[in-house]
Amino acid sequence: MNKTYLKLSLDLDFVLIAITASMKDYMLCHKINTSLNFNFEKVEDHEVYFNIDEEPLTFSKYFFFVEQGEIEYYILNNRNAEGFLIPEMNKVDFFMIIHQYIDNEDLNFILTGLNKLSDIQVAAQINPAKLRSNQNLIM
Protein backbone atom coordinates (compact mmCIF):
# COMPACT_ATOMS: atom_id res chain seq x y z
CA MET A 1 0.00 0.00 0.00
CA ASN A 2 1.27 3.47 -0.91
CA LYS A 3 1.62 6.04 1.82
CA THR A 4 0.90 9.69 1.36
CA TYR A 5 2.55 12.26 3.59
CA LEU A 6 1.24 15.69 4.31
CA LYS A 7 3.93 18.28 4.75
CA LEU A 8 2.91 21.45 6.56
CA SER A 9 4.83 24.65 6.17
CA LEU A 10 4.33 27.60 8.46
CA ASP A 11 4.10 31.17 7.24
CA LEU A 12 7.13 32.67 8.98
CA ASP A 13 7.20 35.77 6.82
CA PHE A 14 7.77 38.29 9.60
CA VAL A 15 10.60 40.03 11.39
CA LEU A 16 11.24 38.79 14.92
CA ILE A 17 13.06 40.80 17.57
CA ALA A 18 13.93 39.22 20.92
CA ILE A 19 13.93 41.66 23.85
CA THR A 20 15.45 41.05 27.26
CA ALA A 21 14.10 43.52 29.83
CA SER A 22 13.20 42.81 33.44
CA MET A 23 10.06 44.94 33.61
CA LYS A 24 6.31 44.60 33.23
CA ASP A 25 4.89 44.40 29.71
CA TYR A 26 2.86 47.60 30.00
CA MET A 27 5.94 49.52 31.18
CA LEU A 28 7.97 48.23 28.23
CA CYS A 29 5.25 49.32 25.80
CA HIS A 30 5.01 52.73 27.47
CA LYS A 31 8.76 53.27 27.12
CA ILE A 32 8.72 52.16 23.48
CA ASN A 33 5.71 54.37 22.77
CA THR A 34 7.34 57.46 24.25
CA SER A 35 10.85 56.96 22.89
CA LEU A 36 10.14 55.53 19.43
CA ASN A 37 6.78 57.23 18.74
CA PHE A 38 4.86 53.99 18.58
CA ASN A 39 1.35 53.55 19.92
CA PHE A 40 1.15 50.01 21.33
CA GLU A 41 -2.17 49.11 22.94
CA LYS A 42 -3.16 46.02 24.88
CA VAL A 43 -5.28 43.57 22.88
CA GLU A 44 -6.67 40.12 23.57
CA ASP A 45 -4.04 37.72 24.91
CA HIS A 46 -2.20 35.33 22.60
CA GLU A 47 -3.34 31.76 23.25
CA VAL A 48 -1.19 28.70 22.65
CA TYR A 49 -2.32 25.09 23.02
CA PHE A 50 0.57 22.93 24.21
CA ASN A 51 -1.69 19.91 24.89
CA ILE A 52 -5.03 19.41 23.18
CA ASP A 53 -6.61 18.11 26.41
CA GLU A 54 -5.64 21.17 28.45
CA GLU A 55 -6.61 24.81 28.52
CA PRO A 56 -4.41 27.09 26.39
CA LEU A 57 -1.63 29.11 27.92
CA THR A 58 -2.12 32.84 27.47
CA PHE A 59 0.56 35.44 26.91
CA SER A 60 -0.04 39.18 26.98
CA LYS A 61 -0.12 40.85 23.56
CA TYR A 62 0.14 44.47 22.44
CA PHE A 63 -0.59 45.79 18.96
CA PHE A 64 0.32 48.83 16.86
CA PHE A 65 -0.76 49.39 13.24
CA VAL A 66 0.83 51.78 10.73
CA GLU A 67 -1.58 52.53 7.90
CA GLN A 68 1.17 53.68 5.56
CA GLY A 69 2.58 50.36 4.43
CA GLU A 70 0.00 48.43 6.46
CA ILE A 71 2.64 47.30 8.93
CA GLU A 72 1.49 45.39 12.00
CA TYR A 73 3.63 45.44 15.13
CA TYR A 74 3.07 43.06 18.03
CA ILE A 75 4.76 42.69 21.38
CA LEU A 76 4.30 39.31 23.03
CA ASN A 77 5.31 38.36 26.53
CA ASN A 78 7.49 35.24 26.49
CA ARG A 79 6.62 34.29 30.08
CA ASN A 80 3.57 33.56 32.12
CA ALA A 81 3.01 31.71 35.40
CA GLU A 82 2.88 28.30 33.68
CA GLY A 83 5.84 28.55 31.30
CA PHE A 84 7.31 30.11 28.18
CA LEU A 85 5.89 30.93 24.78
CA ILE A 86 9.21 29.90 23.20
CA PRO A 87 10.79 27.53 25.76
CA GLU A 88 14.18 27.37 24.03
CA MET A 89 14.48 31.17 24.42
CA ASN A 90 13.91 31.21 28.19
CA LYS A 91 16.31 34.15 28.74
CA VAL A 92 14.15 36.37 26.49
CA ASP A 93 11.34 38.33 28.13
CA PHE A 94 9.46 39.69 25.09
CA PHE A 95 9.19 39.33 21.33
CA MET A 96 8.41 42.06 18.85
CA ILE A 97 6.84 40.71 15.68
CA ILE A 98 6.66 42.88 12.57
CA HIS A 99 4.29 41.75 9.80
CA GLN A 100 4.63 43.20 6.28
CA TYR A 101 7.69 44.61 4.61
CA ILE A 102 10.03 46.80 6.63
CA ASP A 103 13.24 48.08 5.06
CA ASN A 104 16.64 47.73 6.72
CA GLU A 105 16.82 51.42 7.62
CA ASP A 106 13.56 51.27 9.59
CA LEU A 107 14.55 47.97 11.20
CA ASN A 108 17.92 49.41 12.26
CA PHE A 109 16.13 52.48 13.69
CA ILE A 110 13.91 50.21 15.82
CA LEU A 111 16.79 48.00 16.99
CA THR A 112 18.98 50.99 17.82
CA GLY A 113 16.12 52.73 19.63
CA LEU A 114 15.31 49.62 21.65
CA ASN A 115 18.93 49.08 22.64
CA LYS A 116 19.24 52.72 23.76
CA LEU A 117 16.47 52.29 26.34
CA SER A 118 18.09 51.92 29.74
CA ASP A 119 15.71 49.18 30.92
CA ILE A 120 16.39 46.92 27.95
CA GLN A 121 19.47 44.73 28.33
CA VAL A 122 19.44 43.62 24.70
CA ALA A 123 17.20 43.64 21.64
CA ALA A 124 18.26 41.55 18.66
CA GLN A 125 16.73 40.26 15.47
CA ILE A 126 16.44 36.48 15.29
CA ASN A 127 15.40 34.12 12.54
CA PRO A 128 12.01 32.54 13.43
CA ALA A 129 12.71 29.56 11.15
CA LYS A 130 15.53 28.47 13.46
CA LEU A 131 13.28 28.22 16.52
CA ARG A 132 11.90 24.79 17.46
CA SER A 133 8.72 26.34 18.85
CA ASN A 134 8.17 28.85 16.04
CA GLN A 135 4.56 27.67 15.57
CA ASN A 136 3.74 29.38 18.89
CA LEU A 137 4.37 32.76 17.23
CA ILE A 138 1.76 32.28 14.50
CA MET A 139 -1.23 34.58 14.98
Image (spheres, rainbow, N blue to C red):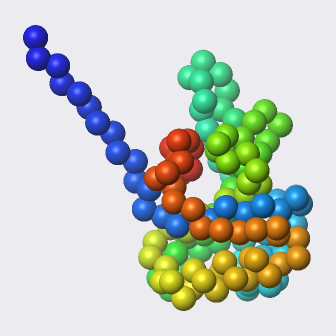
| Relative depth, front residue between 96 and 38 | 96
Query: Where 130 falls versus 1 (above or below)?
Result: below
Residue 117 quadrant: bottom right
Q: Is residue 1 left or right of residue 82?
A: left
The residue shown at (73%, 63%) is: 19
Q: Residue furthest left?
A: 1
Residue 18 quadrant: bottom right
Q: Is residue 26 visible?
A: no
Q: Is residue 4 left or right of residue 17?
A: left
| Relative depth, front residue between 109 and 81 | 109
Q: How many marks?
A: 0
The residue shown at (67%, 26%) is: 55
Q: Quadrant of the N terminus?
A: top left
The residue shown at (82%, 67%) is: 121
Q: Is residue 5 visible?
A: yes
Query: Where 105 falls versus 13 (above or below)?
Result: below
Q: Give the image location of residue 47, x and y in percent.
A: 64, 41
Residue 36 quadrant: bottom right
Q: Give the image location of residue 17, x and y in percent.
A: 63, 65
Q: Give the image location of residue 99, x and y in percent.
A: 50, 67
Q: Give the image location of residue 137, x and y in percent.
A: 56, 50
The residue shown at (59%, 24%) is: 51
